[in-house]
Each structure stands twice: as C-alpha cells, then as structure tokens.
Image (cartoon, helix red, strand yellow):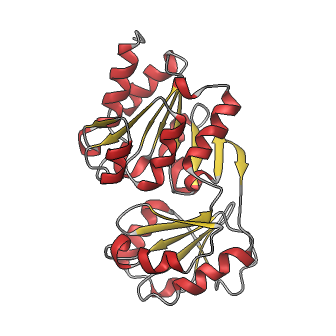
Amino acid sequence: MIRLIVSDLDGCLFDGNGHLPEDFEETFQLMQRNGVVFAAASGRSVQGVAPHFAAWDQQIAMITDNGACGFLGGKRLWAEALPKSRWFPVVRAARTFQGLRCIGCGMDEIWLEHTEQLDETSVRELKKYYPSWRDVHYDDLKEDLIKLALFYYGDIEKDVYPQFSQLMDQSLSVKVTSTTWIDVFDKRISKGRGVALLQEKLGISKEKTIVFGDYPNDLSMAEYAFRSFAPSNAHPDVKACFTDVIRSNLEGGVTETIRKELYRQGMG
C-alpha cells in the first residue's frame, strides 16, 4: 500500500503558471484520509516552496534545494551546506560566462549581487522561485550556502552546461533543472537521498513510495520508489528511466495519477 508520495513541482505538479492544480486540495484530502504522507521535492529553496503549501504546512513534508534540506510539519529535519571555500570558486567561474547570474541560497536567506542591474523580466522570473532576497557582493559574504543557483536567459543546457560543468571540482554536482536554471551543490546530495532520509524518518519503505519528476535532477528519486511517474512534457532522459509516463503538468497529470493509484488500492 502506498504510504509516501513525493512530487517535483515546476513542470510536474505545478501548472504552466507555477501554481498548484485546482484539484490539489481534493487530492491532498484523499491522501490525508488514508494516512499517506505527501512530500514536495524541489530544487527551490524552502522560501520558494513553503508559501505554496501554507494551508497544509503542518501535514506535508518538503525536500528542498535538490535534497540538501528536509522539512516535516514545518520543522527542519536536516540541512547540509557548503563553506565559502567550496562555493566561491563557482561564483568566480560563473562570472566568466556572459549573462549568467548566481543566486546564493543560504540556510535562511537568499543572496544576489548587483541587484541594481536586474531588469523587470529577470525580477519576475527570479521571484517565481525566490520571493525575496538581500543584496550582497559575494566577495564579502562569509556565510555557508546550501547551493548556488545559476540563471541564464537562453538554453542553459546547450549554451552553458557543457563548458561550465568542466570547470567544477569533482565534489560538486552541476544539475540542469530547467531550460534557464542550473543548480550547484554538494555531490553527496540528491533528491533521491532526500527521499531516503525522509523514508528513514517516517519508517516507510521503498515498496510503499511513489515519485513524480520531470527533469534530470529528479532521476535519483526513482531509486527509492517502486514506481516513478514522468509527465509527458518531461525531459527525454526522465521519460526513458521512470516506470510510467502520464499526462502533462498542464493537464493535471500528477494529481490525476495520485487519485487513480489510491483508488486502485481501495483508498476511497
């Protein structure tokens, strides 16, 4: 019987406007009635995830920053950060790519430099994922960071990733998370590891877990689930590796599939 459902957000659970589908409340109540834990898993930091689930913050789990942080019932379960000696070389490398911008994701703050150079289009895009931030020059910032998010208008997988990934040391993961974003974080971290940590905390096995994802940073979650679902709009690598392909995020494929799977197991 399903006891844990983990879903990516952007391009997966969220609709084309970055909102929860209209039937999420109905689907969530079905999970609640049957003792199923729902976990939102995202490359976003908690500041970009929690507001969407404010009505259910005491009931859901969150795996944020590609697995670097985990939350349950509004409380942080784990957090793993990079010291400046490890994240600052990423900033230096990013500065050599024209049009590539760094977002420093701290434990409780989001940091950007040269915010005066942001145009309105960039501000709108950034605020989809990071509702607020503080201005800083990274040379002066001494804090540990959970990750660095890299933002680029264009095809980041084609134009930036091949060259940028070669500049990183082997202890860091460089993951394309959408057409305009790359996340850089500790290589030991993944969404899959986040699922495993949450399973351990809840006492729920792989055989009672299903996951949903759409981009390569979601691939590791499939290792910790007995079934994995990719929406039809997912990256080809994800559709090839996950067990099932479902309707797209624009068609509410995730919530539709959750209800179907729970009904199939007699959870009405």
Q: Give the side of residue 248 with respect to residue 213, left or right.
A: left
For the point 43% across and 74% down, which residue is it?
161
Camera sees residue 19 = no
x, y percentage for residue 210? 46, 31
In the rendered image, the vertical position of residue 99 relative to residue 226, given as above or below:
below
Q: Give the side of residue 260 with respect to residue 127, left or right.
A: left
Q: Quarter of the image holding residue 200?
A: top right
Residue toward you, 98 or 110 = 98
Residue toward you, 177 or 60 = 177
For the point 69% across and 60% down, which residue is it?
107
Camera sees residue 165 = yes
x, y percentage for residue 41? 51, 45
For the point 35% across and 79% down, which residue is it?
159
Dividing the image into 4 quarters, which one contains the C terminus?
Answer: top left
x, y percentage for residue 253? 29, 36
For the point 52% across and 50% down, which residue is it?
49
In the rendered image, the vertical position of residue 264 relative to residue 26, given as above or below:
above
In the rendered image, the vertical position of residue 150 relative to residue 128, given as above or below:
below
